[in-house]
Amino acid sequence: MSTILVMTPFWVWLILLFLVMRGIKAMRPNSMSLSGMLILPVVFTVWAGLGLSKFGHATVALDVWLVLGLTIGLALGVAIFKGLQGYHYDRHTQHIHRPGSVRMLLISLLAFMSKFAVALYVVRCSLQKTDISPLIYGGVSGMVCGLLWGAIATQIFKALKRRERAIPSPLPELKG
């Protein structure tokens, strides 16, 4: 176990630190720009793409596992944030105001641990010359990306939906 921790590249620990810091910030009510909210799913999607490109031979099975994982992850991300209230969009600052919640920290840590565990598994499989590692990597990568995209998309849609309801009509009401 200590060998794994010592042999892990420094940049991996920087990603973990970044995720923990953002997750702690998300535990209190905060506001964030749309581009700031998209950083996490974009980074994990690029990370997944780079990892999948190492397998070189994209097969139909790998694609199916990736799409299946993405679909499951999207559904989970939406379900986790569906009931949380208190989002709204500020047109002047162009920020989304979010209620404080531990949910984003937990999702971020789950995403990191899943990617870390599957990376270790893939290394182990490649040492043992096992062919199932691309499928595992594709499924887990898809699920992690889907989870993050589902969580962020749900928060953005909730904020924009609230904005639409909060804008008063510019036309005066006509009394009949």
Image (cartoon, helix red, strand yellow):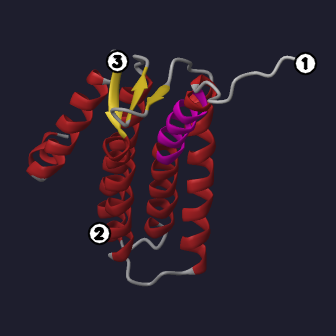
The residue that label 2 is drawn on is: 127
Q: Earlier in the sequence, mark 1 or mark 2?
A: 2
Q: Quadrant of the N terminus?
A: top left
Would you say the residues marked 3 and 2 are in contact, meaning their CB atoms lie under 8 Å apart?
no
Residue at the image position 33 percent from the left and 15 percent from the top: 28
Quick check: can you spot residue 8?
Answer: no
Tell me which residue sits at (20%, 37%) in the image. Answer: 18
Furthest-bottom residue in view?
57
The quarter of the displayed image where residue 104 is located? top left
- Left or right, 58 with reference to 26: right
Q: What amino acid type is highlighted by mark number 2?
A: Leu
Quadrant, the C terminus: top right
Question: Label 3: few (<14), some or many (≥20) within 10 Å?
Answer: some
For mark 3, give the secondary structure: loop
Return the residue at label 1: 176
Queried whether the magenta region covers residue 140, the answer comes back as no
Residue type highlighted by circle 1: Gly
- Residue occupying the point 42% across, 18% down: 101
**Whole-number angstrom distance, CA of label 3 to CA of label 2:** 41 Å
Could you tell me residue 80's position as x and y percent? 57, 29
Q: Which residue is mark 3?
A: 27
Range drawn in magenta: 149-162
Q: Which mark lies nearer to you, 1 or 2?
A: 1
**Callout 1 crowding tier (Cα within 10 Å): few <14, some 14–19, many ≥20:** few
Q: Nearer the viewer, residue 116 or 142?
A: 142
As helix, strand or loop, the secondary structure at mark 1 comes to loop
Q: Position of residue 12 (x, y in %)?
A: 18, 48
Q: Is residue 20 above or below residue 72?
A: above
